[in-house]
Amino acid sequence: MGKGLAFLLVLLVVLLAALIVKVTSREAPTIQLQGQIKGLGQSTPIQFEVRDPQHSVRSVQLEVRQGKRVFAVPVVAGTTEVRTSWWRFWRKRPESRASIQTRVGRKEIPDLQEGRATLRIVATNDSWGRFFRGGRSELSMDLPVRLTPPQVQVLSFPHYVNQGGSELIVFKVSAGTMESGVKVGDYFFPSWPVRDSMPETRLCLFAYPYNVDPATPASLVARDDAGNETVSNFTYRVFPKKFHTDTIDLKDDFMTRVVPSIMSQTPELQDQGSLLKNFLLVNGQLRQANARELVAISQKTADHFLWTAPFIRLPAKTEASFADYRTYLYNGAVVDHQTHLGFDLAGVEQMPVRAANDGVVAFAGFLGIFGNAVVIDHGCGLESLYGHMSSIAVKAGDPVKRDQEIGRSGQTGLAGGDHIHFTMLLDGIPVNPVEWWDPHWIHDRIEAKLAPYK
C-alpha cells in the first residue's frame, strides 16, 4: 500500500470518527427561566431565555399537558446571533440567544381546567447531533392550575384623602393572594399584614400624590401566584387642594456656592459649560434621579409599624411648604419650574435635628439636591426625610427613638441658608407632613381603623 493511500485512509478514518462524534453529540441549548412560575391562571406571564454557545437556536416549543390532552402554545422568539460561513469552521461562533415572553392560561387555552398541569419547554439547535436532528433540551414543571381570581373584602371605613395626602384602608384577601394594594393612577401602594397571625387581613397606606388629578380613580388590586388579578372598587372621597406658588430669583453667588459642591459629589453629571446650565441640570435631572433613589430606598421598609406615638415637628419657622410650585428667574427671565415637596424649617444655625418618630435609619449620607440627608423608615412604606444637614449623627441600620437627635441643620445641597428640608414619604413618594404632625388625624385615619386588630 502506497504512503499516499495510507494517508488517505487515515484521513478518512479521522473524518469518519469526527462525523460520528458530531452526529451522536448531545450538545444542546440551555433553558433559563426568568422568575419563578408557581402556577397557571387566567393568563400567567411566562418569560425564559434559550442559550447556545456553539450553535444556532433552531426552534423553541412550549406546550401544556393536562390529563391526556396536549395544548401547544405559540411562542415568538427574539433571537440574537451572528452567523459564520460554514467553511470557516475553525472560528468560534458567538453565543446564540432566544428570548421568549408569552402568556399561558385559560385565555390562551380555553379548555384548560382547574387542577394540575405540566408545562413543557423544548429547545433545539442546528447542530448535527442526534443524527442531524439537532441538540435538544427539555424543561418540565408540574404546576397547579388556579382559574379563580383572589377575593377582596373591605373592612375599614370611611376613606377620606387630601390631594397630596395619605389614607389607610384595611381589607381581607383570600388564601393564595401573593400581592395586594391600592392603585392610584400610575402609582401602586402595597399592603402589609395587620398582624403576623392574620396574614390575609391587610393594611395599606396609600396617597393621592400632589400631581395626580383628584378625579383619578383608586382601586384595590390583588394578585395570586398564578397571575390571576382582581381589581375592586372601594368607597372613598378625595379633597382637592390648591398649593402655593413662589418665585425664586437666581443669583450668581448662590449658584456659585451650591452647584460646584453638588457636582463634585455627583460625578455622573456632565459639566454643561456654564453655571446656569449646571444649575438647571442639578435642579432638574438630579432632582429626578434623587426621587428615583428615594423610591429604591423605600423597598427595604419593615413589614410592620415601628412607631406608636404621633409624629413630632421641629420647633422652627416654616420657610417653605409642601408642594409649593416654584418659578425660577435669572436676569428677569423664566428659566425653570419645579415643585418643592416638603417643608423648609429654619431656626438657629446648626440647630439639633430630631427624629419625628421611632424607626430605623434607611439612609444616611449625601443625597444630591438634599445634601447631607437622613431617611428614617417607620414601617409599611412610611418614611421621613431630613435634608441639608451640616452633620449626621446616625448611620444606616441604626434604630432611632422619637425625639432623638440625628444631626444638625445646615445648608448642604440646594439650600439658600441654614435650615432642614423635612417631608414624609410613602413608598418613596413625598406626602404632606402636616397630617402626620396632627394627633387627631393619626387617631381618626390610622389608629381607629387598626384598633380592632390589636
Image (tube, helix red, strand yellow):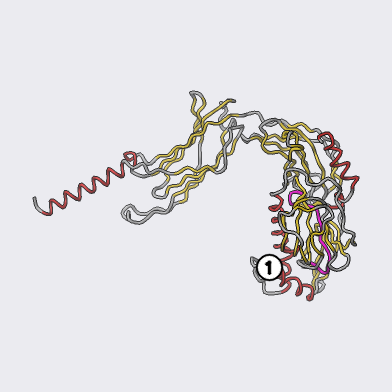
Is label 1 in a helix, a strand or a loop? loop
On screen, residue 431 above or below 417 = above
Amino acid of disc 1: Gln
Q: Is residue 234 left or right of residue 177?
A: right
User: How far from the left and from the top, in percent, is residue 450?
Assistant: 82, 37
User: How far from the left and from the top, in percent, is residue 315?
Assistant: 90, 59
On screen, residue 62 above or below 422 = above
The C terminus is located in which quarter?
A: top right
On screen, residue 124 above or below 8 = above
- Place residue 82 in its image quadrant: bottom left
Q: Residue at x 58, y 35 (%)?
A: 38
Q: Residue furthest top?
A: 68
Count of marks overlaid on the render: 1
User: How far from the left and from the top, in percent, is residue 87?
Assistant: 31, 54
State the residue position of label 1. Answer: 265
Q: Are there few (<14), some (14-19), or many (20+) residues within 10 Å of tag 1?
A: few
268 part of magenta stretch: no
Which residue is more in the foreground, 443 or 105?
A: 443
- Place residue 192 in its image quadrant: top right
416 part of magenta stretch: yes
Q: Is residue 198 left or right of residue 78?
A: right
User: How far from the left and from the top, in percent, is residue 94?
Assistant: 42, 54
Report the magenta residues as a range.
415-428
Q: Residue at x 64, y 69 (%)?
A: 270
- Place residue 366 in its image quadrant: bottom right
Q: Residue at x 64, y 65 (%)?
A: 268
Q: Residue furthest left?
A: 1
